[in-house]
Image (cartoon, rainbow, N blue to C red):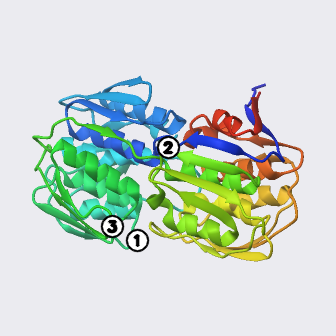
Amino acid sequence: MTSETHLEIRGGTALEGEVPASGAKNSALKLLAASLLAPGGNILANVPDVADVNVMFEVLESIGADVTRTGDSVMIDVPTVPEPVAAYELTSRMRASIQVLGPLLARCGRARVAMPGGCNLGSRKLDMHLAALEEMGAEFSTDHGDLVAVAPRLRGRRIVLEFPSMGATENVILAAVGASGVTEIENAAREPEIQDLCEYLAKMGVEIEGAGGPTIRIQGRGPGATGLAPATHTTIGDRIEVGTYLVAGAVTDGDVTVRACEPGHLELFLNKLEQIGVEVDTGDTWIRVRRTPSGLRAADIVTLPYPGFPTDLMPQTVALLSLADGSSVVTENVFDARFQFVFELNRMGALIRTEGRHSVVTGVEKLQSAPVVAHDIRAGAAVVCAGLAAHGTTRIANLNLLDRGYENLTAKLGALGAEITRTT
């Protein structure tokens, strides 16, 4: 028999206090992949200690880099001649491993990357990644489950994305560094993590402009992406982690402040919290939430790419809406299998009906504890938030998924007063 680690949460305690945000997982992963572009010692600070980041360390080491962590700083010593292969046993554990494709094409003109794994959120195909790179001159084939790419000479092109995909935007940016001429990406993703990546590349010596807007231009360095220098960069705060702790404070009728964050990265989310009935205060690098005496109110949510409402905060917000007065309609426009968590919340007494990309959340007076499962990282965060508010002790399985996205979750929630333990 094998043992499995669970979370046990005794709910009903109002969370109070302050907690610092960790570095953004979704940024750190792409920064680590980007380090492959500059031979030598790259240094990244504020890198979260989560399972996905540790997998990316292994991916980089398999390519030939030496990776050393000291506290929240990471030194990546990138070889002059990388090995352009990312094996299945690594990439199957994390979808973001596909981001090494772009820098390997830029540096080596070829790559062999096993098809990636990660959270099961429905169809998240690589069509846009591959179509854009093909326009730049890459040729693709498959071999025993591996994606084999050859691009001896990438060419700058005007790339129009049919959807502002964050992953496709990042891969095209990274490959474009090794192209001849200018690459222009239209309908580019605008997330803060994209801006963070572009700032890091600029420190290496890449001429890049437009990050944060719908059009990004990259001046290529030609085959091999020659002449770039290793750089030092600090990862931005994790806006999804920040939002999760804010919901945890609100759902428990608490008073929680998250520090080391950028409130501007969560503007629409914070506006929605206020609409739901949560009091929100912000400073330059902190956000505070408190429940208002009038209680929670229903509100409709539509997820969209940034600067729209983030899909990665939708499950947690649904947990909050499950205790609001009235009925809310939630529409998911990014991932077609995002609502897997709804079954778990309904097991805890929530009243949620789902059809296709829409869910109707009818608020109930209270939630009850139950054994539940984390179906993906953010689904796990949703049942954690629900467990904090529920009567009794909630037991959450598939804890390894939460470990992929949240650094020191148990300790941080415990510091806010939550009764939460890891058990085997």
Asked whether, in this view, residue 322 is left or right of residue 219, the answer is right
Q: What percent of the width, then of the height, locates residue 343? A: 78, 59
Residue at left offset 40%, top offset 64%: 165
Name the residue nearer the viewer: 108 or 47.
Answer: 47
Residue placed under numbered mark 3 in the picture? 188
**Do the CB atoms of the residues marked 3 and 1 lie less than 8 Å apart?**
no
Q: What percent of the width, then of the height, locates residue 274? A: 63, 68
Residue at left offset 56%, top offset 70%: 303
Please identify, in this view, whether the residue under mark 3 or under mark 1 is nearer the observer.
3
**Callout 3: few (<14), some (14-19), or many (20+) C-alpha neighbours within 10 Å?**
many
Position of the N terminus, as image quadrant, is: top right
Q: What percent of the width, then of the height, locates residue 395? A: 81, 41
Question: Residues under labels 3 and 1: Cα distance?
Answer: 8 Å
Which one is earlier in the sequence, the residue at label 1 or at label 2?
2
**Callout 1: few (<14), some (14-19), or many (20+) C-alpha neighbours within 10 Å?**
some
Image vertical order of residue 143 relative to residue 51, above or below: below
**Do the CB atoms of the residues marked 1 and 2 lie less than 8 Å apart?**
no
Please identify, in this view, whether the residue under mark 3 or under mark 2 is nearer the observer.
3
* Amino acid type of the residue that numbered disc 3 sits on in the rendered structure: Ala
The label shown at residue 163 is 1
Q: What is the quadrant of residue 135 in the picture?
A: bottom left
Question: Residues under labels 1 and 2: Cα distance?
Answer: 22 Å
Which one is earlier in the sequence, the residue at label 3 or at label 2?
2
* Amino acid type of the residue that numbered disc 2 sits on in the rendered structure: Met
Name the residue nearer the viewer: 40 or 136.
Answer: 40
Question: Residues under labels 3 and 2: Cα distance?
Answer: 23 Å
Residue at left offset 87%, top offset 48%: 369
Q: What is the quadrant of residue 191 in the picture?
A: bottom left
Asked whether, in this view, residue 155 is left or right of residue 11, the answer is left
Callout 3: helix, strand or loop?
A: loop
The label shown at residue 94 is 2
